[in-house]
Image (cartoon, rainbow, N blue to C red):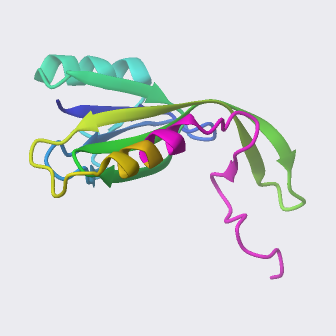
Amino acid sequence: GELHLVLSPARSVDTHVIRVCSTTGALEYGGAPGLDVFPSQSAAVAHLRKRGVCRTVTEGCALLGCASFGDCALALIAKRTRTAVVLPNGHEVLTVTEAQWVRCALRNPAAVLTREERANVQALTDIPLENLYFYCETFDVTRSFAH
């Protein structure tokens, strides 16, 4: 079925709706107010219900990752976060305190996974991420801090 991710970033006043294509697993987002961007999660969900496309909605703070594996697409959503540290430049690094993998079946799978590959996908989704995953919404913390 069709999957919509309704995300309210911790440091944003807006809520963003990202659609996961049920054919390819690709993310679809245009940044258009009233279509992809809303003032709140409730306004975004109400809009999806009104359009009749609200089969599956997952709410959270951030999309941490996504990938397509055979006949399904997976998205990793941060459901809850907390500030881990504030950098000297004022950027807040967040830690994920609750995460959820969301699965979307694909209509026309590009490949069929072997039993071993399915086990590997399951092992990936079983890894606990709570209090082990950090990110920053306003600064690339994967790069060195040199100016």
The image shows residue 122, relative to residue 47, as above or below, that is below
Image quarter for residue 95? top right
Quarter of the image that includes the C terminus: bottom right
Q: Position of residue 102 (x, y in %)?
A: 40, 33
Residue 98 in the image: x percent, y percent? 64, 27
Residue, x 31% and y 51% (percent of image)? 69
Residue 77 spot, x, y in % from top left: 50, 37
Residue toward you, 102 or 4: 102
Magenta part of the chain = 121-147
Query: Quick one: 70 or 63, which is closer to the camera?
Result: 70
* 89 left or right, relative to 20: right
Q: Locate residue 40 relative to residue 85 in the image: left or right.
A: left
* The N terminus sits in image quarter: top left
Residue at point 20% right, 17% down?
Answer: 49
Residue 56 higher or lower than 133, as above or below: above
Q: Is residue 49 above or below residue 125?
A: above
Q: Position of residue 70 (x, y in %)?
A: 25, 51
In the rendered image, the vertical position of residue 96 relative to residue 79, given as above or below: below
The answer to whether residue 64 shows anywhere in this view is yes
Residue in the image at 20% along x and 21% along y: 55
Residue 142 belongs to magenta span:
yes
Relative to residue 92, is residue 51 drawn left or right? left
- As for residue 31 lying within the magenta part, the answer is no
Q: Is residue 88 left or right of residue 82?
A: right
Q: What's the magenta bit mostly, secondary-structure-wise?
A: loop
